[in-house]
Image (cartoon, grey):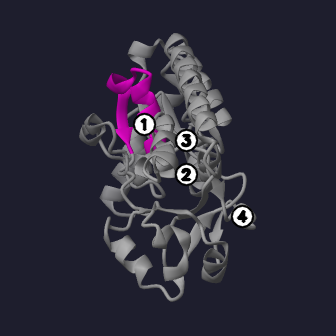
């Protein structure tokens, strides 16, 4: 083994000892050193006033703008374990699915890992309270959750007042090609429902899956939301060139939208209310 490799391993092992034996498990918020490996969790930590405690984030954590200045510890799917350990975090926030292997490795190194992976808004609120509890931000978390509940209730009232209009059928395009969308029980399906829309792909076999172009034409949605990371304008131009799509209600009525920031739609975090309001506007206000 080369000298550089031995030195690297020595640093990792020494930090493992420090993290395992050198720190108290329950620290006050002012003393916490936090690493966040998911952009939605980074946003949540900022919302709870913990920005000064964050010593490392994944490369996709770019909101609020201050997050861009924090030390990067690798990508969402491939965090740099050695760099992360060198930062001596008291707690590392991860998410599920592709981060599960990284979470397991971090735990083996004696790091305190907390997984934030809400599948819906109810779980997002529960996770917010739990994050507040373990970071000594109970009061801020409770206040944040109560505010969000109040805002969700206001949206519900707005939708109720708009139901004199017909509920719009909605197709949410996640990607193309292949054509990807959101199915029932997905986070995005919930956003569409709360905003007063009907997801035409609610019978898709998985929460996020491929979908038939023929079915989109057949079900003729009133609104199409382009929520992918593809450049604004490019996606709209592409959709107009698809065979048979010219007869879809949303295209004939010019109700294809690619102007909603995909981050607020795809990150289950503090901006969820903003995401629902943006969808509501496309469903009812812009459609008048």
Residue sitting nearer the eye, 262 or 10? 262
Residue sitting nearer the eye, 248 or 125? 248
Q: CA distance from mark 3 to mark 4?
A: 35 Å
Q: Residues within 10 Å of mark 3 (few under 14, many from 20)?
A: some
Query: Which disc is residue 42 wearing?
Result: 1
Q: Which quarter of the rendered picture does the N terminus lie within?
A: bottom left
Q: CA distance from mark 1 to mark 3?
A: 22 Å
The mark lying in front, picked from 1 and 4, is 4
Residue 228 shows up from this direction: yes
The mark lying in front, picked from 4 and 2, is 4
Q: Are marks 4 and 2 in contact (CB under 8 Å)?
A: no
Q: Residues within 10 Å of mark 1 (few under 14, many from 20)?
A: many
For mark 2, what is the residue? 102
For mark 4, what is the residue? 206
Q: CA distance from mark 1 to mark 2?
A: 17 Å
Residue 127 place in picture, x, y as percent: 61, 30
Q: Residues within 10 Å of mark 4 (few under 14, many from 20)?
A: some
Q: Residue at x 44, y 22 (%)?
A: 48
Q: Quick check: 102 left or right of 237?
A: right
Earlier-in-chain disc, 1 versus 3: 1
- Dividing the picture into quadrants, the one containing residue 219 is bottom right
The residue range painted magenta reads 36-57
Q: CA distance from mark 4 to mark 2?
A: 25 Å
Q: CA distance from mark 1 to mark 4?
A: 27 Å
For mark 3, what is the residue? 109
Q: Residue at x 62, y 55 (%)?
A: 97
Earlier-in-chain disc, 1 versus 4: 1
């Amino acid at each position: 083994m080369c000298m550089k490799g031995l030195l690297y391993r020595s640093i990792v092992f020494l930090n493992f000892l420090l993290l395992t034996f050198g720190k108290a498990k329950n620290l006050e918020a002012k003393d916490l050193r936090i690493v966040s490996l998911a952009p939605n969790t980074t946003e949540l930590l900022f919302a709870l006033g913990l920005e000064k405690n964050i010593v490392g984030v994944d490369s996709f954590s770019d909101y609020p703008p201050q997050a861009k200045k924090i030390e990067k510890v690798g990508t969402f799917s491939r965090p740099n374990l050695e760099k992360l350990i060198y930062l001596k975090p008291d707690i590392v926030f991860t998410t599920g699915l592709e981060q599960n292997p990284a979470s397991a490795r971090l735990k083996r190194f004696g790091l305190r890992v907390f997984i934030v992976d809400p599948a819906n808004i109810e779980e997002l609120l529960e996770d917010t309270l739990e994050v507040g509890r373990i970071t000594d931000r109970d009061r801020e978390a409770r206040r944040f959750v109560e505010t969000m509940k109040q805002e969700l209730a206001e949206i519900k009232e707005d939708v109720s007042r708009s139901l004199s209009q017909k509920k719009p059928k909605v197709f949410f395009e996640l990607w193309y090609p292949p054509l990807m969308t959101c199915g029932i029980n997905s986070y995005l399906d919930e956003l569409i429902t709360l905003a007063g829309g009907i997801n035409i792909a609610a019978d898709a076999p998985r929460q996020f899956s491929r979908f038939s172009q023929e079915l989109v034409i057949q079900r003729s949605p009133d609104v199409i939301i382009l929520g992918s990371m593809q450049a604004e304008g490019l996606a709209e131009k592409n959709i107009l060139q698809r065979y048979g799509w010219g007869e879809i209600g949303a295209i004939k009525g010019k109700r294809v939208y690619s102007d909603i920031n995909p981050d607020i739609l795809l990150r289950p975090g503090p901006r969820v209310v903003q995401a629902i309001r943006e969808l509501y506007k496309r469903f009812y206000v812009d459609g008048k």
